[in-house]
Image (spheres, helix red, strand yellow):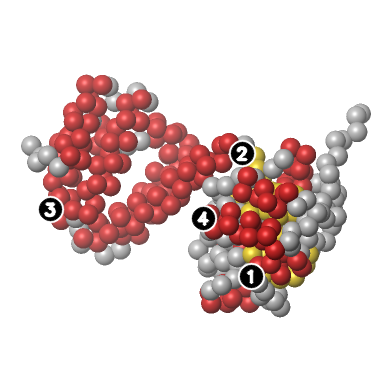
Amino acid sequence: MPAARRTPRAAGLRDAAEAPARLRVGVIGAGRVGAVLGAALAAAGHDVVAASGLSTASAERAARLLPGTPLLPADEVVAAADLVVLAVPDDTLAGLVAGLAGTGRWRPGQIAFHTSGAHGLAVLEPAERAGVLPLALHPAMTFSGADEDADRLTGAPFGVTSRPEFRAVAETLVLEMGGEPFFVAEEDRRLYHAALVTGANHLVTLVAEAADLLRAAGVGDPARVLSPLLTAALDNGLRRGDRGLTGPVSRGDVGTVRDHLGTLTERAPESVAAYVAMAQRTTERALAAGRLKRHEATPLLDLLGEARDGTPLR
C-alpha cells in the first residue's frame, strides 16, 4: 500500500490523521462568529490567549464565551498567537491584513484564517508574504449572538479555500471546531457567497415580510400560520428544486397575481417591488423548468413588467 501523502506542517499542527497540536489562538473580532469559533477551538484543546473587539457587545461576548482571555489591540493579538482567527466584516478585512503586515507582527509559521464568505486567499496575501499559512474557512451558518450559536456550529458546513498542500490543515481545523468542510475554488468564492446570501439573508427578509402582511390582514400570530407552510416549502425546494414550486405563478393564474398587486398597491405599497421581482424570477424559473408553457408565462411576465414600470394595472 502506498504511503499516505503528507502535507506541510505549520506552527506545529500535525497531519489531519493525527491528534492536533495545541496552538495559541488569537481572535481578531470577538463578535458573533469570532467568539463562537474561539470557544470551539478552546474546546478542542487549543489555548485562546488573546482577542480583540471594539464594541461593548464584543467585550461581553468574549467574557462569556472566552472567559479569562485578555482583550488586546489587533497587532498584539497577532504577536501572541500561532493561529490567528480573522472574524471581521468583509469590507474591513483587506485593510486589516495589510495594516497588520505594516506593523511587522506577522511571522513565518503562523496560521491565519478568515471567516469571510466573500473573500478567498487573495485578501491574505500580505500575511502570506510574511510566511503565514493562509486559509479561508467560512461557516455556512447564521449566527445571531444567542446562546444557541455554539450548538449551531456542530455539523455546520464550512466553505474552505486553501492551497492544495494545506487542505489537510484546513480540514483538521474545521473538524476540530465541529464543522464539516467542503472546498470552494478561489475564483468561485464570490458566487458561493452570493448564493448563501440569496438563500439565508433574503429568506429572513421574505419571512419577515410575509409576517408583516399577515398582521396587516388581522392574523395575530403569523408564526403559527407560516411555520408549517414555510417548513414544507423549504423541504420541497431543497428536495425537488423548481419541481417543488406551488402557487398562482406555477399555475399561470394571472388574475390572482393581478389581484395581489392591486391589494398590495392599496394596503402595503412598500411590498410591491419585492413581490414583482420575486414573481418575475419565479415565472422565469417555472418556464425554464417546464412548469409553465410559453403561452402561460407571457401574460404573467407582461403584467409584472407593467407593474415594475408603474403602468396602471388593467
Q: Quadrant of the C terminus?
A: top left
Return the residue at label 4.
91
Spot occupied by residue 233 in the image (x, y as percentages of width and height): 39, 43
Mark 2 near mark 1, Cβ–Cβ under 8 Å?
no
Is 200 located above or below residue 105 in the figure?
above
**Amino acid carrying mark 4 in the image:** Asp
Task: State the separation of the CA atoms marked 1 and 4.
Answer: 18 Å
Which residue is more in the foreground, 219 or 33?
33
Task: State the separation of the CA atoms marked 2 and 4.
Answer: 18 Å
Secondary element at image label 4: helix
Return the residue at label 3.
266
Spot occupied by residue 266 in the image (x, y as percentages of width and height): 12, 53
Would you call the spot at circle 1 few (<14 residues within 10 Å), some (14-19), or many (20 or more)? many
Locate residue 93 relative to residue 303 in the image: left or right: right
Q: In which quarter of the image is the N terminus?
A: top right
Task: State the separation of the CA atoms marked 3 and 2.
Answer: 47 Å
Mark 3 and mark 2 lie on one chain; the one further toward the N terminus is 2
Is 199 located above or below residue 68 in the figure?
above
Q: Residue 186 carries which label?
A: 2
